[in-house]
C-alpha cells in the first residue's frame, strides 16, 4: 500500500466515523424528525391557507361599514346637547 493510498483510506475511515457519529447523535430525534418530514406537505398547504385567510381578514377589517348606533346613553345626551347648540 502506497503512502497516498494509506492517507485516502485514513480519510475515508475518518469520514465514515463522522457519519456514524452524526447518525448516533441524531438517533434520539429520529422519530420527531420523521414525523416533521411527513407533516411538511400539510404544513406548507396550511401556510398558504393561513396567508389567504390573513389577507381576507385584513380586507374585511379595512372595508367601510356603516356606523353603529351608539349604545352609550350619556354620549347620546351630549350629542343632542351639541346639536341643539348648533355645534
Image (cartoon, rainbow, N blue to C red):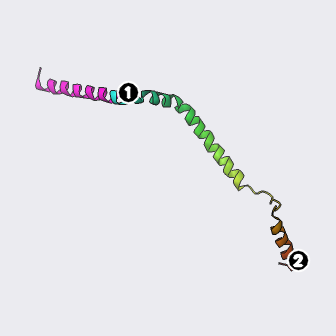
The outermost residue toward the top is 1
The outermost residue toward the right is 84
**In the picture shown, does residue 34 fall above or below 79?**
above
At x 18%, y 26%, the residue is: 10
Q: Is residue 3 magenta?
A: yes
Quadrant showing the C terminus: bottom right
Q: Is residue 35 left or right of residue 71?
A: left
At x 38%, y 27%, the residue is: 27
**In the picture shown, does residue 44 fall above or below 84?**
above
Q: How many marks?
A: 2
Quadrant showing the N terminus: top left
**Distance between the alpha carbons at the discs numbered 2 and 1:** 79 Å
Q: Of marks 2 and 1, which one's residue comes earlier in the chain?
A: 1
Q: Is residue 10 magenta?
A: yes
| Main secondary structure type of the part rendered in magenta | helix
Mark carried by residue 40: none
**Rendered image quadrant of residue 68:** bottom right
* Residue 80 drawn at (x, y percent): 86, 72
The outermost residue toward the left is 2
Look at mark 2 in the image and give the residue it sits on.
84
Look at mark 1 in the image and give the residue it sits on.
27
Q: Is residue 35 left or right of residue 6?
A: right
Q: Which residues are magenta?
A: 1-23
Amino acid at each position: 500500500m502506497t503512502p497516498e493510498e494509506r492517507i485516502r483510506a485514513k480519510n475515508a475511515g475518518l469520514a465514515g466515523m463522522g457519519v456514524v457519529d452524526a447518525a448516533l447523535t441524531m438517533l434520539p430525534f429520529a422519530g420527531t424528525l420523521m414525523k416533521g418530514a411527513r407533516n411538511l406537505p400539510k404544513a406548507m398547504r396550511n401556510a398558504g391557507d393561513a396567508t389567504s385567510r390573513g389577507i381576507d381578514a385584513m380586507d374585511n377589517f379595512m372595508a367601510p361599514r356603516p356606523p353603529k348606533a351608539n349604545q352609550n346613553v350619556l354620549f347620546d345626551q351630549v350629542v343632542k346637547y351639541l346639536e341643539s347648540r348648533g355645534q
